Image (cartoon, coloured by chain):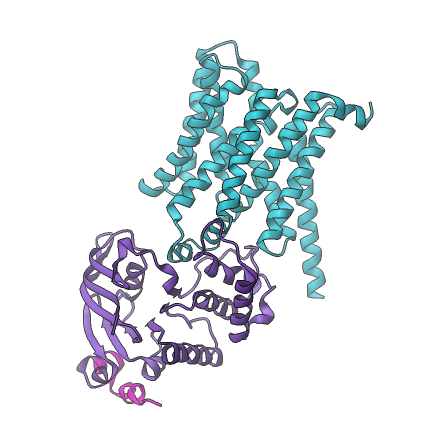
Chain colours: A purple, B cyan
Amino acid sequence: MQELIRVEQLTCRHGAVEALSGISFSVAAGDYLGIVGPNGSGKSTLVRALLGLMPSYQGRISLFGQSRENFTAWQRLGYLPQNLGPLNPAFPATVFEVVQLGLLAGKGLPRRLCRQERQQVQELLELLGIDHLQRRMIGELSGGQQQRVMLARALINNPELLVMDEPTAALDPEIRDRFYELVARMNKNKGTTVLLVTHDTGTIGQYASRMLYLDKKVLFFGSFDEFCHSPEMSVFFGEHSQHLICHRH
Amino acid sequence: MTIFEMFSYSFMQRALLAGTLIGVLCAVLGVFLVLRRLSLIGDGLAHITFGSVALALFAGLQGAAMLLVSLPVVLLASLGILKLAGKARLGGDAAIGIVSSVGVSLGVLLAVLGRGYGVDLFSYLFGSILAISRAELLVAGGLFITVLALLWLYYNDLVALTFNEELAAVSGIRVRFLNGLLAALTALTVVLAMKLVGVMLISALLILPASAALQVARGFRMTVILSVLFSLLSVVGGIVLSFLLNLPSGATIILLAFVIFCAGYLFRQLQTVKNKN
C-alpha cells in the first residue's frame, strides 16, 4: 500500500514550550486515521506541521513520497480546519465563490474556471445539500452552514487525502452524522485517506481504521482493534466508554 | 463656461485621464486592503511618499523625474513594513507607524535643509491633479498597465489570500509572495495617487470606494466592480466640481467619495430594516 504520510522524529515548539516531542508514524493510502489526545496534547500542532503552517520544526515529514518542504501537489490534499478563525462577517464572497476558490488554486495563472468546472462546483453543492445557499454571502450563514461550505471547498478537488481538525464542532447532531457518513463513503468507495483529529469518541469508534493517541509524544499508534484492547484506551476514554467505542455498528 | 468648454482644455483632459487610471487602481486594491484590515498601509506609504518627494526636491528633481526617487523608496518601504511586521515581533500597525513616522521626519528634515521648495512640497501634500504634466501622465499610464495586469493575473490568488491566509497556503498559493506583491502594488499606486489627492488623502481614496462597495455589493466580483464605479464617480465628479467651483481637487474628490459611502451605508441600513420586516 502506498505511503501518503511519513513523520519521523517530529519535534515542534511554541516558543520555549515543547508541543510535540520526537513523534513518528506513517499513514498508508486508504487509511482512516483517528488522532486523539487530551487538550494541549499537540494534535492541532501536528496537523499544522503536516500542512506547512508551522514556521519551524525538527524532524522529517513527507507527503505523497515528497519531503514537506518540496511538496507542491497541494491539490491532492483537502483540509478542513476546526473553524475559519476570525471570519470577517462583511466578507463579500458568495458560497459559490468560496467553494470555487478550492478548484481555482490548482489551475495555472490567471486561474479562471471553464463551464465544466463551474458545473463541478454546482454538483458538489447539490451532493452536500447546500446548493440552495450558493448565492448567499458566506458571512450571513450560521456556523454549521459555513462549515458545510468549507467541507465543499475541501472536497472540490476530489482529494486523495482529507485532513480534518475537529470539523464538526459547529454542527448539530443530524448534520454531523450525515457529514461523517459522507466522509466514510469517500474512504470506502473512493479510497480517500482520512486524517481526523477529534474528541468525538463515537465517530472514532464507528469509522477509524487506525488510531494515533498523542500526549506530546505517541502513546499509541496502531490499528483500531489493537487500540480497543490496549491499556491506553482505558486510560484515555475510561472503562465504560471502551465498550461503547469499540462496539462497531 | 459650459461643461463642453471645460473638457476642451488639455490640462483638464490630462487630469481626467490620470484621475481615471489612479481611481481604478485605488478601487481594486482598496477592496483587498480593507478586507485584510490593511487600510492604513496606504496612509503609512503616503507618509513615506512625502519623505521621498522631499528627497527628490532636495536632489533638484522636478515633475516626472521625481518618480525616479519616489518609486524605489516607497517600494522598499512597503517591503520593509512587511519584514518588520513578520520578523520583529511587531503587529502590522506598529510596523506601519514606525516606517511612516520615519518618512515624515525625513521629509520635514529635508524640507528645512533645502529651503526654497516649500510650495512644491505643499502641492504634494494636498494634490494638484490639474497641474499634471504630459510626462507624468505617460508614467502613470505605464504603471497603470503594469499594476492592472498583475492584479488581473493574481486576482483569484488575492481573493483566496483575503478570504483565509492558511487555507490559501494549504491550497498551494504562495502567500509570502502575494503579501509582497500586494504591498508593492499598493506602493506603486500610492506614488501615482499623490499627485491626484495628495499625501494626506491617499488612504481615503483606497478606503472609501471599497468601503462603499462593501455596503451594497453581493459577491466579490460585484464588490470590485462597484468599488471601481464609486471611485470613478468620486474622481471625475471631484475634478469637474473643483474646476467649476474653484475648489481644491483632492479634498473635493475625497468628500464626494465620503458622500457616496454615506449613501451606501444608508442603503444597507434600509435593506436590513426591510429584511427584518
Residue A29 in magenta? Answer: no
Q: Main secondary structure of the magenta part?
A: helix
Specify the quadrant that holds the C terminus of chain B. Answer: bottom right
Give the tally of numbered discs.
0
Location of residue B114 in the rendering, given as x and y in whole percent from the top left corner = 46, 11
Q: Along the line of sight, which residue is nearer the eye, B79 or A104?
A: A104
Res. B263 visible in picture: yes
Residue A238 in magenta? Answer: yes
Say which residue appears at 68% left-offset and 31% top-offset: B252
Q: Quadrant of residue B132?
A: top right
Q: Which residues are magenta?
A: A233-249
Q: Along the line of sight, which residue is nearer the eye, A209 or B90?
A: A209
Say which residue appears at 18% left-offset and 66% top-offset: A24
Residue A62, compared with residue A187, is above or below; it is: above
Location of residue B262 in the rendering, given as x and y in whole percent from the top left corner = 68, 45
Specify the quadrant that holds the N terminus of chain B. Answer: top right
Residue B21, compared with residue B210, is above or below; it is: above
Location of residue A11 in the rendering, given as x and y in whole percent from the top left corner = 20, 59
Say which residue appears at 46% left-offset and 27% top-offset: B71
Residue A73, compared with residue A31, is above or below; it is: above
| Residue at the top extreme of this rendering | B116
Q: Quadrant of residue B19?
A: top right
Location of residue B144 in the rendering, given as x and y in whole percent from the top left corner = 55, 34
Res. A142 visible in picture: no
Say which residue appears at 28% left-offset and 64% top-offset: A64
